[in-house]
């Protein structure tokens, strides 16, 4: 599928060269990614907000408060079935895995904020910056989502796809290193996986959030 003039083979070649140049060795025969229909700006903004709202549960926000915020901002329908289960579960009853999953969504939020031009620092190895809180509505103040959604303008499809392709190749390198007991300061596999998931979802409108594949 030809979308936005994206040439996946050319992007693969350029990214392979770029990654090798910064110490991330990727194999030349790793295939290029298929180009699909992209998510729309509003859908990406609302996915980012849903994740950000649920993240507040990890930080101790009451379930009923987060549920009310989502309802007031017409975001309830954007919850996945798994997210709805988490929202319906008291914090005392959340499993350790649920809490871990909630914690790591901050990386997907950071990636989606990058997609929406909220920042320019989506790396393979550095954590989320403190500035993220100022990019999002203030949940503590019950701030509306309207301003965030209206100001959320995604980058060009080619730029987003290029970044996804980089994360796909960096993920292969990180996984290969992990399997072989090697370390490399240029990568953090946990960050890469969560950020890649967000980019994969943005670049494939048919993909369901809970079913995003991270094959390499």
Image (tube, rainbow, N blue to C red):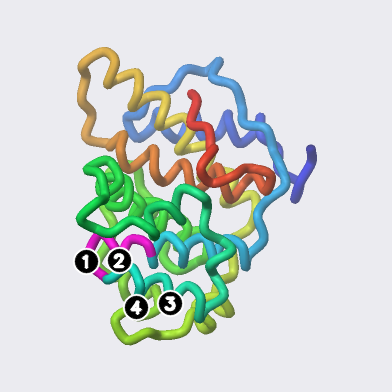
Residue 108 coordinates in the image, percent (x, y): 41, 52
Q: Earlier in the sequence, mark 4 or mark 1?
A: 1
| Secondary structure predominantly adopted by residues drawn in magenta | helix
Taking depth in this image into account, of 183 and 203 the one nearest to the observer is 203
Secondary structure at numbered mark 4: loop
Q: Badge 1 is on which residue? A: 60
Residue 21 among those drawn in magenta: no
Q: Which of marks 2 and 4 is nearer the N terminus?
A: 2
Give the spatial CA distance, label 3 vs label 4: 11 Å
Give the spatial CA distance, label 1 vs label 3: 15 Å
Give the spatial CA distance, label 4 vs label 1: 12 Å
Q: Earlier in the sequence, mark 3 or mark 4?
A: 3
Q: Is residue 94 above or below residue 118?
A: above
Q: Quadrant of the N terminus?
A: top right
In the image as oriented, which residue stretches furthest toward the top?
A: 180
Residue 172: quarter of image: top left
Give the residues drawn in magenta, as a range: 54-61
Give the spatial CA distance, label 1 vs label 2: 6 Å
Give the spatial CA distance, label 2 vs label 3: 13 Å
User: Neighbour class for label 3 at 10 Å: few (<14), some, many (≥20)?
Assistant: some
Q: Which of pointers 1 and 3 indicates the residue nearer the eye?
A: 3
Q: What residue lies at 66% left-to-right and 29% top-to-bottom?
A: 9
In the image as oriented, which residue stretches furthest toward the right?
A: 2
Which mark, residue 56?
Answer: 2
């Amino acid at each position: 599928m030809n979308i936005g003039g994206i040439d996946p083979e050319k992007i693969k070649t350029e990214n392979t060269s770029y990654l090798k140049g910064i110490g991330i060795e990727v194999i030349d025969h790793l295939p290029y990614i298929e180009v699909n229909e992209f998510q729309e700006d509003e859908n990406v903004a609302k996915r980012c907000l849903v994740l950000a709202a649920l993240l507040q549960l990890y930080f101790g926000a009451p379930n009923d408060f987060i549920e009310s915020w989502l309802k007031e901002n017409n975001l309830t329908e954007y919850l996945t079935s798994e997210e709805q289960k988490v929202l319906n579960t008291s914090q005392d009853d959340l499993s350790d895995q649920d809490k871990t999953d909630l914690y790591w969504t901050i990386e997907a939020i950071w990636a989606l904020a990058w997609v929406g031009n909220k920042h320019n620092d989506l790396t393979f190895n550095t954590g989320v910056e403190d500035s993220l809180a100022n990019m999002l509505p203030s949940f503590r103040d019950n701030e509306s989502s309207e301003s965030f959604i209206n100001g959320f303008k995604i980058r060009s499809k080619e730029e987003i796809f290029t970044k996804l392709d980089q994360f796909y190749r960096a993920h292969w390198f990180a996984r290969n290193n992990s399997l072989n007991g090697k370390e490399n300061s240029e990568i953090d596999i946990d960050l890469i996986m969560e950020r890649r998931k967000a980019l994969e979802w943005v670049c494939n409108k048919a993909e369901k959030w809970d079913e995003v594949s991270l094959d390499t």
